[in-house]
C-alpha cells in the first residue's frame, strides 16, 4: 500500500524511529536484534517497562496519537507500543522540534533510540561517552 498524506495525495515514505528499554550496557547490536524480533512479530510476554510507559505518556501528551489531531507528526496511529519499546512512524515533513522532543524524552527516560533509515542506534545522553 502506498502511503497517502492527509489530503489523499501520495506521500513520501515515513521516517521511522523507535525507543528501546534494554538493560544497562546493551549494545547497538542488541538493539538491532530486538528490532528484528519485533519485525518478526516476536514480542515477549512482559510487563511494560516504566521507562517506556513514561516516554509514551510524555510524547503523546505533546503529540496525541489517539486520536491524532490535525497537523500530527504521526504517519501511522496509534503508535506501536510494546513492553520494551515504542515505534514511531513520522511524516518525513514533520517539524524538527518533534525529532528534538523524541531525542530529549528518550534521554530523560534512559531509552536507546533506533533510526530505522540507516540502522543507527543512539544511547541516551547520560550513557554516551564524551
Image (spheres, grey):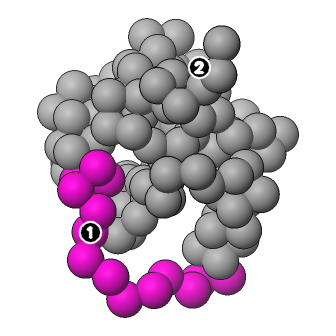
Which residue is denoted by mark 1 in the rendering? 48
The image quarter in which residue 72 lies: top left
Which image quarter is the N terminus in? bottom right
Viewer-closest of 120 and 63: 120
Q: Label 2: which residue?
A: 93
Residue at 22% across, 26% down: 62
Q: Point out residue 110 in the picture as x, y percentages from the top left corner.
A: 39, 39
Front-most of residues 26 and 102: 26
**Residue at horizontal 48 percent and vertical 59 percent from the top:** 23
Q: Position of residue 37 (x, y in %)?
A: 65, 77
Q: Secondary structure at mark 2?
A: loop
Choose between 51 and 114: the one closer to the eye: 51
Tell me if 13 is positioned left or right of 92 in this view. right
Instruction: Identify the residue at horizontal 51%, vertical 22% (top origin).
Output: 125
Whether residue 17 appears in this view of the structure is no
* Magenta highlight range: 40-53
* CA distance for labels 1 and 2: 31 Å
What's the mark number on residue 88? none
Q: Quadrant of the C terminus?
A: top right
Amino acid at each position: 500500500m502506498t502511503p497517502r498524506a492527509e489530503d489523499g495525495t501520495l506521500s513520501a515514505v515515513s521516517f521511522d524511529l523507535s525507543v528501546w528499554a534494554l538493560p544497562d550496557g546493551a549494545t547497538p547490536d542488541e538493539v538491532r536484534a530486538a528490532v528484528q524480533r519485533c519485525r518478526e512479530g516476536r514480542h515477549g510476554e512482559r510487563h511494560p517497562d516504566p521507562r517506556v510507559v513514561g516516554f509514551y505518556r510524555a510524547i503523546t501528551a505533546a503529540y496525541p496519537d489517539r486520536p491524532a489531531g490535525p497537523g500530527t507528526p504521526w504517519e501511522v496511529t496509534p503508535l506501536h507500543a510494546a513492553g520494551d519499546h515504542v515505534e514511531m512512524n513520522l511524516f518525513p515533513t514533520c517539524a524538527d522540534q518533534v525529532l528534538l522532543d523524541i531525542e530529549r524524552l528518550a534521554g530523560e527516560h534512559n531509552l536507546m533510540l533506533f533510526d530505522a533509515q540507516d540502522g543507527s542506534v543512539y544511547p541516551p545522553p547520560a550513557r554516551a561517552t564524551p
